[in-house]
Image (cartoon, rainbow, N blue to C red):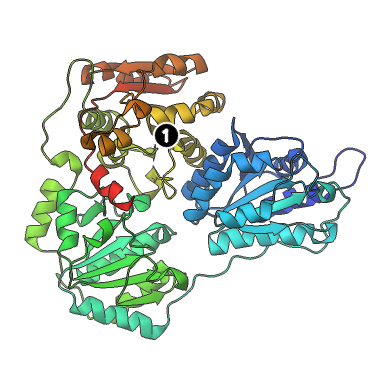
Amino acid sequence: MSRAGTGPTVADVVGGMLVRSGIDAAFGVVGSGNFAVTNAMVTAGARYVAARHEGGAATMADAYARMSGGVAALTLHQGCGLTNALTGITEAAKSRTPLVVVTAEATNRRSNFFVDQEALAVAVGAVPMRVAAPEDAGAVAAAAVATARDDRRVVVLNLPLDVQQLPAEPGEARPVPPRGPRAAPTEDAGRLAEALQRARRPVFVAGRGARGAGSGAALEALADRCGALLATSAVSKGLFRGSPWDLDVSGGFATPLAAELIGAADLIVGWGCALNMWTMRHGRLIADDAVVVQVDDDADAVGTQRPVAFGVVGDVREVADAVVPLLPGPTTGYRTDEVRAALAARRRWRDEPFDDGGKAGLVDPRTLTIALDDLLPADRVVAVDSGNFMGYPSMFLDVPDEFGFCFTQAFQSVGLGLATAIGAAVARPDRLPVAALGDGGALMGASELETVVRLGLPMVVVVYDDAAYGAEVHHFGPAGHPLDTVRFPETDFAAIARGHGFEAVTVRAVGDLGAVREWLAGPRAAPLLVDAKVTRDQPSWWLEEAFRGH
């Protein structure tokens, strides 16, 4: 850990303990303040991924943690390094991503780098910690990882400049063992079992808290027992892939059939799911007489977004496993022959008929995405940016499981999509990474195109270019507002991508996708960008729903 001719410093001890505690990857932009601790992490065995902007690095780390199931690290320079990363950190904090932000800190108020970093962390929902003395360095670093891992929190670990360079020894500090899953009280499990026995049309909606190891299988076993249909929030898309009773995503992205079936449920159980306005369409997916139950290992989360009949506090898998033996035996529930037939015919958005709106020089985004879904390998990981376009890749591109879809949209920031795809690709090198971006988000995150090439990622980047901030066009345009502030000249994204070392193709009709087929059949030596010029006269179907929350 020590540099040649010197003993270990606080930075060395912190970096080593972070890796010993389970962090195997760090993302960041290195400056003078985080140079030593980043090198210490690399020396201890972590992979370091250099981004071109701290905002991109934050989202890469967020996506890596989501898709790997572990704790990731983000390493930052003091002051401006942290403020550059704040949007990505806020997204991760709102998503309860286990992430340790290792940031240098200027504590001298006369320093031009000084900001109140602890206050910044609290303001965005992260947990601030600080290494205040050499003798505490190892223990504080171990506690930061344990908090991120066990409480699913973003921890901002401040390393004061005048402390991190001091001599230090690891001492007796050790990594903190993982906390075991929280089991539900027996009486709560029994109450849920009684509700399931009474229900005739139960629906399970699984959220990010159901993405833990074995949770999906446990929920499917319980659903088989009580006849429940299975749905997810957007961030857990793919969790029940392969089940004949999978409704896919609930909420604004839901298919007409899924919305109909969820809306007719007499019992809705949210499993690690907030049941918020997006997942429940502002409550309109819940029948007036439906019983709503929420299962979550965080007691404070129960009933926060909407009233519930009762909550069960415990780990999703533990609760599901505990309820199964309390049910007398398999029942039909909502799994009738009629529902089975309807799902077989109309499970996916592509099963819904539509009139192709393509015109000269512009391709219908639905037709485009269906064609891409047929072309791209099924073993993929899809990352989606924010904007009017986002429903098309989110719902028309299938994914193999919950680790095939990475959706960094808790904060609804435009511009995170490319960095999301990079982090997901690093976590899942066995899958084809697909980044779906709007033109606005593509330009915001364009600095990370170089990162894709430098890392040698065989990525497909699809830019849905409507030459506008389409959400604002379709929200304000019908009322007659001027739209000059949200419309732009068409951008040659293919040329931009080639300048970074991508292969690229401009698509104005489905017939132009032959270049994608050729790339897939070839060595994929460079990533591919699809510059799709899409129709722009119609809003996506989910947009009206989205703006109900504004």
Q: Quadrant of residue 45?
A: top right
| Residue with the mark numbered 1 | 433
Q: Is residue 381 left or right of residue 512?
A: right
Q: Where does the N terminus fall, quadrant-wise?
A: top right
Q: Residues within 10 Å of mark 1 (few under 14, many from 20)?
A: many
Tell me which residue sits at (59%, 65%) in the image.
Answer: 178
Tell me which residue sits at (14%, 28%) in the image.
Answer: 356
Tell me which residue sits at (86%, 54%) in the image.
Answer: 168
Q: Mark 1 is on which residue type?
A: Pro
Task: Residue 404 in the image: state x and y as whole percent.
Answer: 38, 44
Task: Residue 397 in the image: state x and y as whole percent.
Answer: 28, 38
Tell me which residue sits at (50%, 70%) in the image.
Answer: 181
Element under disc 1:
strand
The answer to whether residue 511 is above or below residue 229 is: above
Q: From this viewpoint, is residue 459 visible?
A: no
State the residue in front, 20 or 286. Answer: 286
